[in-house]
Image (cartoon, grey):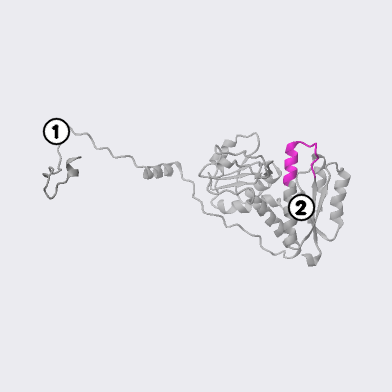
Amino acid sequence: MASLDKRATIIRVEAATHDPADWKIRSDASRISAEQKVANFTKIGLHTDHLVLPSHVTPAQFSAAIESANISPAVTAIIVQQPVPARLRQFVQGIAPHKDIDALTEASSRQVCATAEGIWRVVRPFAQDAPSIAVVGAHGFVGRGVVSRLAEHGHKPRQLDLGDDLDAVREADIVVSVTGSPGILGPQHIRPHHRLVVDSGFVPAPNGKVVGDISPEATKIPQNITPVPGGIGPVEMAVLVERAIQKELQPELESWQYKGRPYQERLSEVDASRAAALAFPTPTRVPRQEGPRTTNRPPYQQAGHEQGTDRDTQR
């Protein structure tokens, strides 16, 4: 798209040194995400302006940055990195709907944000037979998008959020977690029958690593799980790149689809009992006989005979 001289504008608000620790962590995650967007847009030839605004930016200055991108004929896409301070949230709605490729505004032509769309595409091949699905963080921005896409395709996910009894996820076949709360789901929640667990958490840790919603102790339990990092993040980027290409170059471009991976269907309680019985059959017990014991065993041969050995006499 460089030949078309089109640009993308990414707007991000930095955290201040005096901000709470959890806000600084979320701001750092926002920075990493913005840098990934810049890299991916650049690969397809889309010039990208990454505007980093100070934490003390005023609503007027924030709105002016959005409006400048709105009126520029060269800007084809505008993304405001989340989260933004509460005092600025309402002004995000000022993004021109036709340039809002991440569905941040209520008027956007896009149904859901790129993260929610990417999660749905990963879940889809695992949900063909309409299994039970639990969405943790269902009331958040991304969670609402995931629930919307699932409902659109006939699913009725169990919607859970912070404060709910998260033990309910054990009964689901598919688990989607989008809370951004490190380790909120552990071995007590994740089960071997889970055909897919989607971990959309992304929290930079002090040691330089990135952690997700699923605790490290639980990542080996389900049949399939998206890694952190390297799971949903690249999927989100693929959706954004696809939307940018469809908008400017190939409106007819078909959306990419994930084919999924093998999984075992969940057994009913009856089938599970039968399977366990086959795997571990009940030992057959011979009834105790009354009276003198008899045996058909031949008497030992005398030492030196052809059928006798020293080992026979030592039993």
- The quadrant in which residue 54 appears is top right
Left or right: 247, with 188 as reference point = right
Left or right: 254, with 101 as reference point = left
Front residue of 184/161: it is: 184
Residue at the extreme bottom of the image, as rendered? 3
Kind of residue sitting beneath label 1: Pro
Residue 199, image x and y in percent? 62, 46
- Name the residue rendered at 13%, 43% in the picture: 300
User: SS of the residue at dot 1?
Assistant: loop
Q: Are marks 2 and 1 in contact (CB under 8 Å)?
A: no
Left or right: 46, with 123 as reference point = right
Residue 20 on the magenta segment? yes
Residue marked by disc 1? 292
- Name the residue rendered at 68%, 64% in the picture: 253
Front residue of 112/212: it is: 212
**Range drawn in magenta:** 14-29
User: SS of the residue at dot 2?
Assistant: loop
How many numbered circles are shown? Answer: 2
Taking the image as drawn, is residue 152 in sight? no
> Residue 108: which disc?
2
Taking the image as drawn, is residue 189 in sight? yes
